[in-house]
Image (tube, helix red, strand yellow):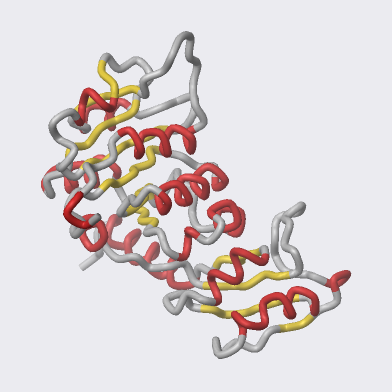
Amino acid sequence: MKKPKWVVQKEQDKKAQGRETVWLFGLHAVRDALMNPDRQKIRLVVTLNAHNKLSDAIDGVGITPEIVDPRRFSVPLDPGSVHQGAAMEVKPLEWGRLEDVCIGPKSPRVILLDRVTDPHNVGAILRSAEVLGASAVVGTRHHSAPETGALAKTASGALERQPYIRVRNLADAIRDLQNMGYLVLGLDGEATQTIEMAVEGKRDHPVALVLGAEGPGLREKTKETVDALVRIDAAGQFGSLNVSNAAAIALYASKAPVDRAQD
């Protein structure tokens, strides 16, 4: 019996993911990946100077570095990548299912990205998400930034610690979060209510914030699926924020109440 096309595609995608590797670069990104026991490390290429700076992280990891001349640093990086003499081939991290990371904290916060493809923006969002205590950043498998060296470098180590999940369908992920008890808010500059207004009296609820790419914003399907559309409150005339800045502000504006009993 012939398999349905969607089954064949799913099997092909799974095989492709199994073969996928990522080249991380830069002293900070490589150091954090070396120190992450969950990161599968394949190949480490360093200059002597970089090796000396990373020696404490390399020791005991079980990977033999290839020490090369700076003039012969030939690894498959994009032209202009500032590698600082260090690059490592790794497997992408596997964070599990949405429910594996979005259920747990008393009042979790989650960021969802609707076709945000710029790795620098996603890296900056991961960094803010880690600092502000988000449970996860969620993108889509297609039309969103995958793990790349540029994303890892911008994330400044957060990629190794902050769950970054890519789902097949964003609307389905939103509905899954709603079924988990999340209040799902979509950021839209034309919304009538602010984030603060939407979470008033609900700060102890799990909250998910959905952001779209600069320019296109949220897709219509996304707008129809969220619980409410909200805007960032602004003073005076206001254009638009970079999506990474908007994510940080939205997380802060929707933050859960402090548990004074733990102070």
* In the foreground, 117 or 255: 255
Q: Position of residue 78 (x, y in %)?
A: 70, 55
Residue 20 sits above or below residue 54 on the image: above
- Quadrant including the N terminus: bottom left
Residue situated in front as seen by the camera: 229 or 133? 133
Where is residue 197 shown, x and y percent of the image? 22, 23
Who's the residue at 25% across and 18% down the image? Answer: 193
Q: Is residue 58 above or below residue 198?
A: below
Q: Residue at x 37, y 24 (%)?
A: 232
Q: Position of residue 122 (x, y in %)?
A: 49, 46
- Name the residue nearer the viewer: 256 or 103: 256
On the rendered structure, is 124 left or right of 55? left
In the displayed structure image, the side of residue 152 where residue 188 appears, left or right: left
The picture quadrant where one finds residue 70 is bottom right
Residue situated furthest top in the rendering: 237
Residue depicted at x 43% and y 14%: 235
Image quarter hosting the C terminus:
bottom left
How many marks do you count on the picture? 0
* Residue 99 % position (x, y): 20, 58
User: Which residue is at a point 53% across and 71% down the rendered structure image?
Assistant: 33
Q: Between 249 and 138, which is closer to the camera in this rendering?
A: 249
Left or right: residue 149 versus residue 246 is right
